[in-house]
Each structure stands twice: as structure tokens, then as C-alpha cells.
Image (cartoon, rainbow, N blue to C red):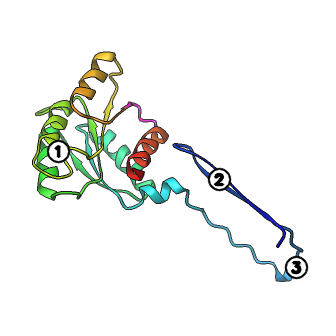
Amino acid sequence: MGGTISCWSKVGEGTEFTVKMSYSLASDEQISVHSHRSETFEDQVLYGKNILVVEDNNINAEVIIELLNTKGMHSEWARDGQEAVEIFEARGEYHFQAILMDLMMPVKDGVEAAKEIRSLPMKDAEDIPIIALTADATEEARERINTAGMNYFVSKPIDHEQLFTFLSYEFMK
């Protein structure tokens, strides 16, 4: 048709396809326009994933779960680190594709919960992405996160684009 197709892509930002072609317009009566929201590559990567949300604050948990829902992800909520370990173990291997873990919680904090999950005798326990969620952005907190085997750090309030970028990157590995 005498046109061109080009592609531009950058990890964490997305992919853009450009299609150029010549065409002639029909009469107004012959034209029908259908518009719909096109899914991004990130949307496709995130859709249908099961995420364990570990957060003791009800409002924060609701916000995170709603954010995940906007991308078609499914979530289960644990209210503390101990409950997170129990849910992760009970659901079985490969049920969850990622864990979003608050650091400061009653019963068992996020660092201890992450360490315990990493030590479980389950095939996915060592590799499941665990993303720390905290308002504590100090170097000490980052060191604790790394020592616990967490993959990433997202500070509160949550930057949803950063969160989705981390999740997308992990799911594409």
C-alpha cells in the first residue's frame, strides 16, 4: 500500500508503533468510527496476575488493591507479616506472581515476613518478586530491605507508575 511501519521501544516506558499509509476518504455516509481504549503492552503483561498485598492500614490496602484492579490484576490482602506468610504458604507454589509488602506492621514486620517467605521450602519462594512499600526512605531502611531479599522499594505515597514498571519488568523476565 506504499506505507511504512516503525517501532520505538524503551524498557519501563513502553512501545510505540507508527503506521503510515495513503488512503482516500469515503463519503460521510460510508464512514463509521469505532473508538476504544487500546491496551498498552504493560496492561497486557500485568493483566490477570495474582498479587499478595501485605498492609496493616485498611485505607492504604484499599487504595493499593484498587490500583491493581485498574490493570486487571487480582489481589489477596494480608493484614500483617505473619498472615502474609500463612497465606503465601497455604495457596501453594506459583499462586502469587508478586508480593507488595509494607515494612512496619504489627505481629511480624515486612522484613521478617520477607525473610521467612524466602526461606520456605517452596519452588517460587526464592524468586517471587517482593516489593517493599514504606514511607521510610532512609539508607538504613534500604539496607534492611536488601538484607531481607526484597527486590524493589516503592516509597509511600505510592507512585503507581513506578510500581507498575517494577511489576512489568519482573513479569517479563
Q: Amino acid at mark 3?
A: Ala
Quadrant of the rendered image containing residue 64: top left
In this orientation, does residue 20 appear? Answer: no
Q: Residues within 10 Å of mark 3 (few under 14, many from 20)?
A: few
Residue 147 lies in what quarter of the image? top left
User: How dense is the environment of label 2, judged by Cα within 10 Å: few (below 14), some, or many (20 and up)?
Assistant: few
Three-letter residue code for mark 1: Ala
Q: Which mark, by number, is residue 26?
A: 3
Residue 47 circle label: none
Question: In front: mark 3 or mark 2?
Answer: 2
Query: CA gap, disc 1 to disc 3?
Result: 59 Å
x, y percentage for residue 84? 17, 45
**Dot 2: what SS?**
strand
Residue 158 lies in the magenta-colored region? yes
Residue 149 against residue 28 in the figure, above or below? above
**Residue occupied by mark 2:** 16
Query: Left or right: where does residue 42 sit relative to residue 166?
Result: right
Q: Which residue is mark 1?
A: 84
